[in-house]
Amino acid sequence: MPAAEDFLKIDYTGVMRGEHHAQGWTEEDLSALESGLNAAQNALEERRKTGGLDFSLLLGEMSEEAAEIRAFADSLRDKIDNFVVLGIGGSALGPQAVHLALNPYYFNELPVQKRRRPRLYVLDNIDPSRFAHLLDMLDLHKTVFNVITKSGSTSETMAQFLIVREKLRQVCGADYPNHIVVTTDQEKGNLLPIARKEGYHCFVIPAGVGGRFSELTPVGLLPAAVCGIDIGELLAGALAMDRRIRESRGITVNPAQLMAGTSHLAWRQGKNISVFMPYADSLKIMADWYAQLWAESLGKRLNREGREVWLGQTPVKALGVTDQHSQVQLYAEGPDDKMFTFVSVERLHPDVPIPTDESLPESVRFLGGHTLGELLAAEERATEYALTLAGRLHRRIILPEVNPYYLGQLLLLLEWETAYMGELLNINAFDQPGVEEGKRGTYALMGRPGFEEKRGAIEGMGEGRYIV
Amino acid sequence: MPAAEDFLKIDYTGVMRGEHHAQGWTEEDLSALESGLNAAQNALEERRKTGGLDFSLLLGEMSEEAAEIRAFADSLRDKIDNFVVLGIGGSALGPQAVHLALNPYYFNELPVQKRRRPRLYVLDNIDPSRFAHLLDMLDLHKTVFNVITKSGSTSETMAQFLIVREKLRQVCGADYPNHIVVTTDQEKGNLLPIARKEGYHCFVIPAGVGGRFSELTPVGLLPAAVCGIDIGELLAGALAMDRRIRESRGITVNPAQLMAGTSHLAWRQGKNISVFMPYADSLKIMADWYAQLWAESLGKRLNREGREVWLGQTPVKALGVTDQHSQVQLYAEGPDDKMFTFVSVERLHPDVPIPTDESLPESVRFLGGHTLGELLAAEERATEYALTLAGRLHRRIILPEVNPYYLGQLLLLLEWETAYMGELLNINAFDQPGVEEGKRGTYALMGRPGFEEKRGAIEGMGEGRYIV
């Protein structure tokens, strides 16, 4: 295992009792969580043996597949200007989060000499205005579309695919299959037969992996590799964290136990909101990725015994320091209904010095001689201080820097935390039965055969009776 | 007043009791809110007379100032390629929200012949990596920076300003003041004397307007005009909604009464979360703008009598249909702790047809012959149906289309709803005392004279004692 200094750290001082933090917990409070956490660890290891935790189980296999993904990505490099992901949910959030984290913020606007890789677009919605605008803007001869849907029956993605396929046929003629890459299930689903018949390049989403746990499969690895991200390092960081979590025990030793234990205790104390607030623009979409992972995994009506429990902490995505000027008023003075997770980065580079100017008024002059990075760190610390004074629970994940290795660790840490929470709450963290009703409603309203009755039910529900 | 069909609509069927919605409210429940709402209306009208509701009071004046703003914006049009807002919080969210709503999604990437206006960047954070990257990317000779800070003492914005000013001096020499435009208070603050001394063009933020209510002042109107948005129409829509709210009475007539009354009843019934979910990519940042407005206005420790109340509903920003694949599992199956506000758009254009292909399997074929817009509308309706079946409270704001007129209406509707909520909760919706502690902490850690004691307190708080 790598040395301790090669891991991200978790500072949980903000949940602990202290001179200024009477509402914090004691070391005994944490110790009391250990037996439950150890039982969860045993149960998760059992599940993993029977193929239930593919996000962890498949890391080795994915490391072997990385070379093939990288080779394909490299083959596109000089041929195309644009790589467009057609996908939604887990097929879209991971690719966007990792790209923003590891590539320059305005990547798509950079000239090709600086970018050296295709632009990345992720069409994660079916808004026709944006869709038409993007298709109109891109030179399709220089564009590859990556259709990502495990089942091949995701309505949004399949609709996008049908539109893009027709457009490509018009513009690129017989060459059009070279402009489509499919990432889908190996055996079942609608997309694979089409892909085989028409000759698209295919990547496989392993059978057991759900969308929100799929970033470190070809779902996320291919777009990352196309944009020049070192996916070997991403997987190495993930593997290191995975091993550390599986091989260590105890809430003050095992980072997933610490994260899940503190989350669970906060939830039991009535914090129905979990705020995830990175202090780096590059981690902004990581908050969206986490929000899906947390909400879809833990928002459940039934527990494992089928009893109605209606559980689930609501994730809130925030960004430091920006949201200090938007949300922190509420965080400090609103109800005590939140657990806060900050993500800090020790080295944001390059740093930018703030010039000195002795002619300025004192209320601004003090900024001179510092750097933007120092100001950002001071604001983060001051916000944590203010939340501590207000008696709020908070913890901090510290990345030495934002690189593929530590990002891989962060992905695995949050996936494991979520899996642990599922155990502690006694629910299935890996399904999503609650989206089925909406899907069936969509089929009905779109006239899919077999759903006529549902259509009548929806149309009869008196929508629109009360309108101002 | 314009005819009813010239207004956005609010469908509140989703909060009302019905055959499938036993948890909904009755018409009597709504009637019971009327006396409180009418009292709030009277109180707000009184406050407005004494200058307390500037977001409404100043609309007329701003309409007169619009010509000057437009003229200045037009004068930049052929001179520059980039317009960069330096601001945070209310100085950043409104400009971004309105720009995304009314200009093409990938505006900055369009060639200048299609864009016909400068690119817009809003630097709403002090992350040094992004800041350095943007300054490096832009041709400063063709760039104007709009420094927006009312007090002139916002640390983040002033730090950005100092860096940009030095850089402009290096690159543009004596011409540098022509690359800075300042939007700030007319009388007080640090920025105005500097601007006057160095000769920057200045726009005024009227005295009483707080950041989150400032979009329809030069804060938002200047960036909008620079990017080609019809600010006259934006203000006309705002004025029409303002008049309608001020001149009508009754919860089923006055849209602000309806919005605030339903929000307040939901809050009283324990919904501590408010989800704002537009079904249009162009309205994505409107959810961020609303989140600031709601959180900072209503998250308050003290009521108007100074009693501790620790109030505030937590806003959650979502996007349809995207978040159906991320958050709706939780919305439907999690705790019943949320009020949902959807925003629909009747005409998203251009719409995009989905091609038919009879060789496809039935589970995909039904999509053909429809349009993306139809699919989006069906999904929205199906989601509302699923939430109704789950007994959740929801309402829907309907915009005929996303244009400046209806967007102006939407801004005013939400501002008035917030003001009403302040009255109903008996708190001051227009201050933000809870961010002061964090600001003082930042001053202390950055070494501002006079804050030495605070610095000792923060550094002595044992941060970092508990680390894994």
Image (cartoon, coloured by chain):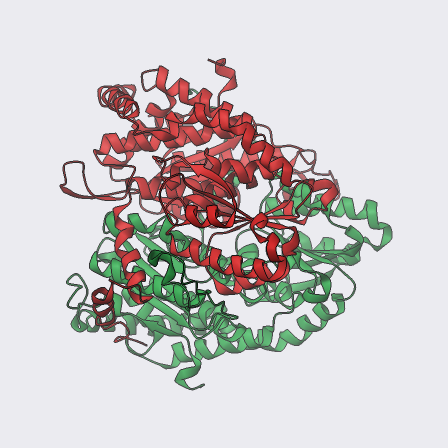
Chain colours: A green, B red
State which quarter of the image contains the C terminus of chain A.
Answer: top left
Image location of residue A218, percent across then percent down:
61, 65
How many numbered marks appear? Answer: 0
Image location of residue B331, percent across then percent down:
39, 44
Residue at x 29% of width, y 57% of height: B438
User: Position of B265 compared to B134: left or right?
Assistant: left
**Can residue A256 be seen?**
yes
Residue at x 56% of width, y 55% of height: A92
Image location of residue A356, percent across then percent down:
44, 65
As rendered, which of B167 and A85 lies closer to the eye? B167
Residue at x 62% of width, y 60% of height: B171
Above or below, A431 against B356 in this view is below
State which quarter of the image contains the N terminus of chain A.
Answer: bottom left
Above or below, A68 against A97 in this view is below
Q: Image quarter for residue A167?
A: top right
As rendered, which of A178 and A302 lies closer to the eye? A178
Residue lying at the far right in this picture: please name it: A174
User: Position of B377 compared to B89: left or right?
Assistant: right
Image location of residue B285, percent across then percent down:
49, 43
